[in-house]
Image (cartoon, grey):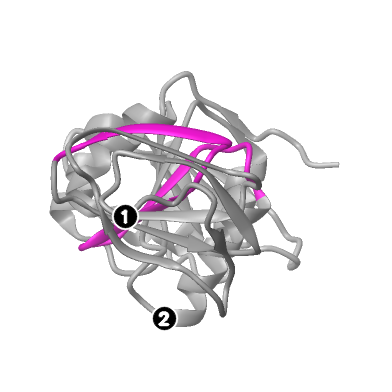
Amino acid sequence: MTRTLLRSETPVTLVGGGPVDAARLGEALGLAPTAVAADGGADMALPAPHRFRAVVGDMDSLRDRASLEAAGVEVHEVAEQDSTDLEKCLYSMVAPLFIGLGFLGGRLDHTLAAISALRARPDTPTVLMGEADLCFLCPARLEIDLPAGARVSLYPLAPVRGVTGEGLRWPIAGLEMAPGGRIGTSNAATGGPVRIAFDAREVLVILPADQLGAAVAALA
């Protein structure tokens, strides 16, 4: 049984140990002001006046735990080795939404593990953000407001069938999609509301990183 280590009434910015773009970090903190580090992500310096509220993980890469604790940062060591530090954060915290940076764009195995964590926690609204892209697991029904021409890629993590696909240049209603089969790379918004639904919550939505505000509004 998992234990809740932290509750936040506001969205949470999660910082991992991978590459973090400073401008994207500032944008995330503007939307999700509570900052939490996943293990070695605590080595990242946050822009003033932000500071980490807590660090969660197995602490195998955290460099200076003592300094963090002396500064009043909660350090929660989760010793189990069956999940990544990102998943440890997601299952041990309660918040309206999470924005994760430092989980995409570095090592490929770490990126795939982060996507796996999204799939493992489908009821936890989470946006992973890199320098160029963001992604999240498509909820049962998604309505998101996007400008005309905005790239919308839909990558199936398991076989699914499109139920709704309004507001896209290439409709997806009725399409069967699967890894190794039909995928939805480089579709585009026609402008205004995009409405998407699949018969299973097994699709990764990939958007340009500059659409973070739209993604957060749609998921929150």
Residue 178, visible in the rendered structure: yes
Which structural element holds mark 1?
Answer: loop
Would residue 178 be found to the left or right of residue 8 on screen? right
Query: Picture coordinates of residue 199 (x, y %)?
Result: 64, 45
- Amino acid on which the number 1 mark rests in the picture: Trp
Tell me what residue is drawn at x 47 percent, y 43 percent: 126
Q: Which circle marks residue 51 in the picture?
A: none
Magenta-colored span: 121-147
Image quadrant holding the N terminus, namely top right
> Is residue 41 positioned above or below 181 on the image?
above
Query: Picture coordinates of residue 33 (x, y %)?
Result: 31, 30
Report how far apart the C-alphas of labels 2 and 1 lie in the structure: 32 Å
Q: Nearer the viewer, residue 168 or 119?
A: 168
Mark nearer the viewer, 2 or 1: 1
Membership of 140 in magenta stretch: yes
Which structural element holds mark 2?
Answer: loop
> Is residue 86 positioned above or below 166 on the image?
below
Image quadrant holding the C terminus, namely top left
Would residue 149 be found to the left or right of residue 161 on screen? left
Query: Picture coordinates of residue 164 (x, y %)?
Result: 48, 39
Answer few, some or many: residues within 10 Å of disc 2's Cα (few below 14, many 20 plus, some between 14 and 19). Answer: few
Which residue has dot 2 on it?
Answer: 107
Mark 2 / mark 1, whichever is N-terminal: 2
Which residue has dot 1 on it?
Answer: 170
Q: How many marks?
A: 2
Q: Nearer the viewer, residue 120 or 218?
A: 218
Would residue 91 be found to the left or right of residue 38 on screen? right
